[in-house]
């Protein structure tokens, strides 16, 4: 594989580098390339709210609609200081590929508000969420563009957004957004879906090679919705979770860590590193007793382990640290964690990378189930959601694996190839190309 090293690497230039690489491999013509290289629509607004102190605050906000050849645009909304247009564009593009890889009838989009939710009160977050819907509402809808949670957004925020949308459109719109609370049109299993989707793939891999999970050491970066659920699922299935982290830092124990205990502690104190600390000073005795030491997020990536799961932000496995990665398998639960430069190095080292557009597609897959339930008025059981998620994830994984093998590609290239071909096919039958 090749990677174009651009002068200034941004999320979108990194996406384009992979796209170009795959375009060459699957021999796409210029008109198709053009349609698949840029978003169909970019919406940007400034959101204004009144802060708790009475002062006005403004936040740049975006909705990027990448491609809707296969169905309504679909993609989450993130609240983060780095959520700028370039990042939201890249994430929207990844969504279009992701929905195609798992074969659900959606296109791809993404939203973002450039803000630091950790500095906002709950009331201020609600203000921003409602203002977002007022700003972009005309571009949203069950048949147009259906948002969902992403980094720093959750079920409460989805509820406020649906409520605002129903108010301004004078409608009942349960399928206009997914990831909602169960009490207001949510689906069973949506909260754990991203982690479960990745877990099904991991289990397929370990089963096929008849590996013993307890001998597999897993390091997980990120302890948000996806990372925390993943840690608990793996621990429950007997894997040895050796490290976890959050934005404050991480912890490492070669003997294994109990993520259930950490989750409980984090709820109380707000930080993973805090699990082994009292207040702000580390309780060294207790850490020694548990054989646990504090590590940085950078250190976590280079630990001796078998499986590395980046489940936080993008651009963490790069040309600078890829050669020091010791895991043999990387499961990308975050969006865009590995740069194209790192991909080249990892491929040479024969590290298998299960890419984001496949590994974390469980979230949007159960979003699809929620959308179906919202449109039909049905309520699925947890068992049905889980069974269907497993079926969809394993079918997608096998298709990507077959493509990788047949066409001598990495799993990322193969996933892009599968997704892009499906989008192209839809564009062809619709007469766009
Ligand atoms: N934000 C999630 C993702 O990146 C879920 C999107 C959705 O459910 O629409 O895949």
Image (tube, rainbow, N blue to C red):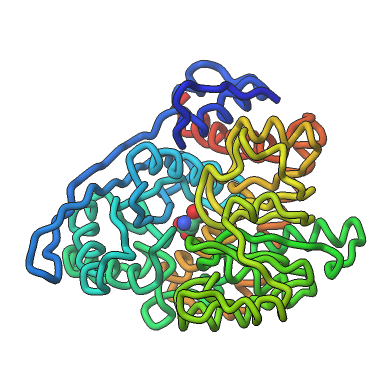
* Residue 240 in picture, x, y percent from top left: 77, 69
Placement of the N terminus among the 4 image quadrants = top right
Look at 53% across and 62% down and name the residue there.
Answer: 249
Look at 80% across and 59% down and name the residue there.
Answer: 204
* Residue 419 in picture, x, y percent from top left: 60, 39
Q: Describe residue 331's horizontal placement relative to residue 34 as left or right.
A: right
Q: Describe residue 24's horizontal placement relative to residue 313 as left or right.
A: right
Look at 18% across and 48% down and name the residue there.
Answer: 46
Is residue 143 visible in the rendered image? The answer is no
Q: Closest to the observer: 374 or 296? A: 296
Query: Which residue sits furthest top?
Result: 30
In the picture shown, does residue 83 fall above or below 133? above
Look at 53% across and 56% down and name the residue there.
Answer: 312
Q: Closest to the observer: 135 or 232? A: 232
Is residue 197 visible in the rendered image? The answer is yes
* Residue 121 in picture, x, y percent from top left: 25, 72
* Residue 238 in picture, x, y percent from top left: 79, 74
Q: Closest to the observer: 392 or 246? A: 246
In the picture shown, does residue 213 fall above or below 88? below
Figure disc tally: 0
Query: Which residue sits furthest left?
Result: 54
């Amino acid at each position: 594989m090749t990677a174009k090293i651009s002068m200034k690497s941004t999320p979108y230039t990194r996406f384009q580098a992979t796209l170009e690489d795959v375009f060459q491999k699957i021999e796409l013509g210029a008109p198709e390339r053009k349609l698949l290289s840029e978003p169909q629509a970019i919406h940007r607004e400034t959101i204004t709210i009144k802060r708790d102190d009475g002062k006005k605050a403004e936040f740049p906000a975006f909705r990027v609609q990448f491609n809707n050849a296969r169905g309504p645009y679909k993609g989450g909304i993130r609240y983060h200081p780095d959520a700028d247009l370039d990042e939201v564009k890249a994430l929207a593009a990844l969504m279009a590929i992701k929905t195609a890889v798992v074969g659900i009838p959606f296109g791809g989009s993404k939203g973002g508000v450039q803000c630091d939710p950790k500095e906002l009160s709950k009331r201020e977050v609600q203000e921003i969420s409602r203002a977002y819907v007022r700003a972009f509402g005309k571009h949203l809808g069950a048949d147009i563009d259906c948002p969902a949670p992403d980094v720093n957004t959750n079920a409460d925020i989805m509820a406020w957004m649906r409520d605002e949308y129903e108010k301004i459109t004078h409608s009942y719109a349960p399928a206009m957004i997914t990831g909602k609370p169960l009490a207001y049109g949510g689906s069973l299993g949506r909260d754990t879906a991203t982690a479960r989707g990745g877990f099904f793939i991991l289990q397929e891999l370990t089963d096929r090679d008849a590996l013993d999970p307890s001998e597999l050491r897993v390091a997980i970066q990120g302890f948000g919705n996806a990372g925390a659920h993943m840690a608990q699922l793996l621990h429950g299935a007997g894997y040895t979770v050796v490290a976890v982290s959050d934005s404050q830092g991480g912890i490492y124990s070669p003997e294994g860590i109990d993520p259930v205990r950490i989750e409980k502690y984090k709820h109380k104190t707000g930080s993973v590193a805090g699990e082994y600390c009292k207040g702000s000073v580390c309780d060294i005795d207790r850490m020694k007793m548990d054989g646990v030491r504090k590590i940085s997020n950078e250190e976590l990536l280079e630990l001796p382990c078998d499986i590395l799961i980046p489940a936080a932000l993008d651009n963490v496995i790069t040309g600078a640290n890829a050669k020091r990665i010791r895991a043999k398998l990387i499961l990308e639960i975050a969006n865009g964690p590995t740069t194209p430069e790192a991909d080249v190095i990892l491929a040479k080292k024969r590290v298998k990378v299960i890419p984001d557009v496949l590994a974390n597609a469980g979230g949007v897959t159960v979003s699809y189930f929620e959308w179906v339930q919202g449109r039909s008025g049905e309520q699925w059981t947890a068992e049905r959601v889980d069974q269907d998620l497993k079926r969809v994830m394993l079918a997608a994984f096998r298709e990507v694996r077959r493509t990788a093998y047949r066409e001598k590609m990495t799993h990322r290239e193969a996933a892009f190839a599968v997704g892009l071909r499906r989008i192209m096919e839809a564009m062809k039958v619709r007469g766009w190309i």
